Image: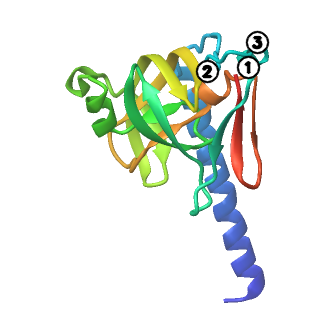
Amino acid sequence: MSNALKFALVTGLACVSAVAWSEALVTLAQRAPALRAAVATAPAASAPAAASAAATIPKSADGHYWAEGQVDGRSVRFLVDTGASAVALTPADAHHLGIDTSGLKFSYKVVTASGEAHAAAVKLGSVTVAGARLDNVDALVIDKGLDTSLLGMSYLGRLASFQATRGALILQP
C-alpha cells in the first residue's frame, strides 16, 4: 500500500471520527439538563480573608488529580476530568450515595473511554472538594464503562476559577 493511500485512509478515518464526536457532543448538549449557578464557599476560618481562600488538590504520582470529595455528606473518590461535561458517577458510587439506580431513566447517550454508554441525570444536594462546596450540582450516573467517578465541568465550571500547576490543582470558590 502506498504512503499516499495510507495517508488518505488515516485522514479519512480522522474526519469520520471527528464528525462522530461532534454529533455525540451536540446530541448530549441538546439533552443535557440546564445548569444553574450557585455560590461556592471555602472552608471556614478565623481570618476574614480566608473566605476566598483557594482549595488545593495535590497531583498524584500517576500524574492525575484525585480528589476525595463529600457528596451530600458521604465520601466519594473522584478523578478530576476537565474533559467531562458533568460530574459522572459510577453505579457503585451512586448506590453508596443512596441513589436508587433501578429507578433512574438512562436516556442520555454518552461516550466514555470504554465506548458508548447510557446515563441518567441526577441532582446532588452538595459537592465539597478540598473545602470548596457547591450546592445543587447536576450529575450523571453512567450505566457502564466508568471505572471511577469523575469530577467534571458541572462542578469545576461553577467555581470562580481553577488552575492546574506542576504539583496541584487550585480551586478558587
Q: Nearer the viewer, residue 168 or 96?
A: 168
As measured in the structure, the alpha-carbon distance from the residue carrying label 1 to the one carrying label 2 is 8 Å
Mark 3 secondary-structure assignment: helix
Q: Is residue 90 left or right of residue 79?
A: left
Say which of 73 and 106 sits in front: 73
Residue placed under numbered mark 2 in the picture: 43
Callout 1 environment at 10 Å: few (<14), some (14 to 19), or many (20+)?
A: few
Percent position (x, y) of residue 148? Answer: 41, 46
Labels 3 and 1 touching (C-beta < 8 A): yes
- Determine which quarter of the picture holds residue 35: top right
- Residue identified by numbered label 1: 50
Q: Is residue 146 above or below residue 143?
A: below
- Residue in the picture at 67% in, 61% down: 14
Please tell me how crowded label 3 is: few (under 14), some (14-19), or many (20+) other residues with Cα within 10 Å: few
- Amino acid under disc 2: Pro
Q: Which residue is pictured at 37% across the width and 49% down the height? A: 145
Q: Secondary structure at mark 1?
A: helix
Q: CA distance from mark 3 to mark 1?
A: 5 Å
Q: Amino acid at mark 3?
A: Pro
Mark 2 falls on what kind of element? loop
Question: Cβ–Cβ below 8 Å for labels 1 and 2?
Answer: yes
Q: Please provide percent x and percent y for residue 40.
A: 64, 16
**Which badge, 2 or 3, is on the more N-terminal residue?**
2
Residue 48 — which label? 3
The first of marks 1 and 2 along the sequence is 2
